Image (cartoon, helix red, strand yellow):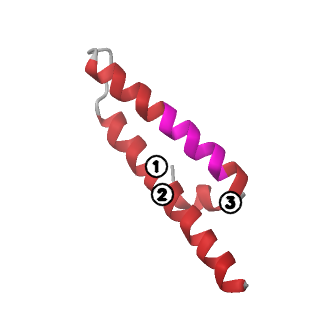
Protein backbone atom coordinates (compact mmCIF):
# COMPACT_ATOMS: atom_id res chain seq x y z
CA UNK A 1 0.00 0.00 0.00
CA UNK A 2 1.44 3.34 -1.03
CA UNK A 3 1.36 6.43 1.20
CA UNK A 4 -0.39 8.39 -1.56
CA UNK A 5 -3.25 5.89 -1.50
CA UNK A 6 -3.53 6.12 2.28
CA UNK A 7 -3.49 9.93 2.36
CA UNK A 8 -6.63 10.04 0.22
CA UNK A 9 -8.68 8.51 3.04
CA UNK A 10 -10.53 10.32 5.81
CA UNK A 11 -9.59 9.93 9.46
CA UNK A 12 -12.52 7.56 10.02
CA UNK A 13 -11.49 5.40 7.06
CA UNK A 14 -7.92 5.34 8.36
CA UNK A 15 -9.12 4.17 11.77
CA UNK A 16 -11.07 1.34 10.13
CA UNK A 17 -8.05 0.47 7.99
CA UNK A 18 -5.83 0.41 11.07
CA UNK A 19 -8.16 -2.05 12.79
CA UNK A 20 -8.29 -4.22 9.68
CA UNK A 21 -4.50 -4.26 9.39
CA UNK A 22 -4.16 -5.18 13.08
CA UNK A 23 -6.55 -8.12 12.63
CA UNK A 24 -4.77 -9.28 9.48
CA UNK A 25 -1.38 -9.01 11.22
CA UNK A 26 -2.63 -11.04 14.17
CA UNK A 27 -4.00 -13.70 11.82
CA UNK A 28 -0.74 -13.80 9.83
CA UNK A 29 1.27 -14.24 13.03
CA UNK A 30 -1.05 -17.01 14.16
CA UNK A 31 -0.86 -18.73 10.76
CA UNK A 32 2.93 -18.44 10.82
CA UNK A 33 3.07 -20.03 14.25
CA UNK A 34 0.92 -22.95 13.09
CA UNK A 35 2.93 -23.30 9.85
CA UNK A 36 -0.02 -22.34 7.65
CA UNK A 37 1.50 -19.13 6.29
CA UNK A 38 3.09 -19.66 2.89
CA UNK A 39 4.64 -16.21 2.42
CA UNK A 40 6.31 -15.06 5.62
CA UNK A 41 7.06 -11.64 4.13
CA UNK A 42 3.35 -10.91 4.59
CA UNK A 43 3.98 -10.14 8.25
CA UNK A 44 6.61 -7.52 7.42
CA UNK A 45 4.41 -5.95 4.73
CA UNK A 46 1.46 -5.71 7.11
CA UNK A 47 3.64 -4.16 9.82
CA UNK A 48 4.89 -1.53 7.39
CA UNK A 49 1.39 -0.75 6.14
CA UNK A 50 0.18 -0.41 9.73
CA UNK A 51 3.08 1.94 10.51
CA UNK A 52 2.23 4.05 7.46
CA UNK A 53 -1.40 4.37 8.53
CA UNK A 54 -0.44 5.27 12.09
CA UNK A 55 2.07 7.86 10.85
CA UNK A 56 -0.52 9.56 8.67
CA UNK A 57 -3.06 9.53 11.52
CA UNK A 58 -0.49 11.19 13.77
CA UNK A 59 0.27 13.81 11.10
CA UNK A 60 -3.42 14.63 10.84
CA UNK A 61 -3.77 14.94 14.62
CA UNK A 62 -0.79 17.32 14.76
CA UNK A 63 -2.24 19.41 11.92
CA UNK A 64 -5.59 19.61 13.71
CA UNK A 65 -3.90 20.64 16.96
CA UNK A 66 -1.88 23.34 15.19
CA UNK A 67 -4.99 24.81 13.59
CA UNK A 68 -6.57 25.47 16.98
Residue at image position (59%, 76%) is 62
Circle 2 Cα neighbour tier, 10 Å, few/some/many (<14 / 14–19 / ≥20): some
Q: Are marks 3 and 1 in contact (CB under 8 Å)?
A: no
Residue at image position (65%, 85%) is 66
Residue at image position (26%, 15%) is 35
Task: Using residue 6 as the reference point, say whether residue 13 is left or right of it.
Answer: right
Q: How many marks?
A: 3
Residue assigned mark 1: 49
Viewer-nearest residue: 55 or 61: 61
Residue assigned mark 3: 8
Q: Are marks 2 and 3 in contact (CB under 8 Å)?
A: no
Q: Disc 1 versus disc 2: distance between alpha carbons? A: 5 Å
Decide if residue 38 is in sight here.
Answer: no
Q: Position of residue 43 (x, y in %)?
A: 34, 36
Magenta segment boundaries in residue numbering:
14-23
Q: Nearer the viewer, mark 2 or mark 3?
A: 2
Mark number for residue 52? 2
Q: Quadrant of the C terminus?
A: bottom right
Amino acid sequence: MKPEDIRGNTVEELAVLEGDLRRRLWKARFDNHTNQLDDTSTIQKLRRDLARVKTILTERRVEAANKE
